[in-house]
Image: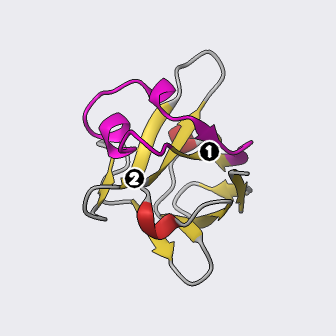
Amino acid sequence: QVKLVESGGSLVQAGGSLRLSCRASGFDLDYFGIGWFRQVPGKEREGVACISSSDGSSYSGDSVKGRFTISRDHDNNLVYLQMNNLKPEDTAVYFCATDFETDPCNTVVRGWSVNAMDYWGKGTRVTVSS
């Protein structure tokens, strides 16, 4: 059974850093891509960063480029999102998601609908105070 569990969300001041974790089970992250997404009430879910299923390259969305970095711990089947220089507009619930047929980077950097991802965690809340 595929399961994704996010953790690490918290309240942080603007300019601070956080590292989110996504623990995957039921599949091997070495063979599939994965993405981080975020959502605020009333807005569509937004792709933040991804690791491509095609070649393992990592990408960040335009709104977080240079501040957020995605990485993978192969030994423990974990994915991280390192978030630096946080801004109040980064406040959101953050999710990790994957799909066994669609490269998550198609949603983060190529404009595909986030609905292409079949497997989602329940999210972790990040609040950035000004």
Q: Is residue 130 visible?
A: no
- How many C-alpha atoms fall within 10 Å of the one at disc 1: few (<14), some, or many (≥20)? many
> What residue do we see at 55% from left, 66% from top?
28
118 sits left or right of 11 in the view: left
Q: Nearer the viewer, residue 12 or 107?
A: 107
Question: Label 1 sits on what residue type?
Answer: Phe
Tell me residue 120's x, y (percent).
64, 41
Secondary structure state at the residue bearing disc 1: strand
Q: Which residues are magenta?
A: 99-126
Instruction: Please tell me in which quadrant of the rendered image residue 12 appears.
Output: bottom right
- How many C-alpha atoms fall within 10 Å of the one at disc 2: few (<14), some, or many (≥20)? many
Mark 2 vs mark 1, CA separation in Å: 12 Å
> What residue do we see at 36% from left, 40% from top?
108
Tell me residue 4's x, y (percent).
68, 53
Q: Is residue 5 magenta?
A: no
Q: What is the number of the mark on residue 95?
A: 1
Instruction: Please tell me in which quadrant of the rendered image residue 57 appears.
Output: bottom left
Tell me residue 128's x, y (percent).
63, 48
Tell me residue 89's x, y (percent).
52, 38
Of all residues shown, which one is farthest toward the top? 42
Secondary structure state at the residue bearing disc 2: strand
Q: Which residue is mark 2?
A: 50
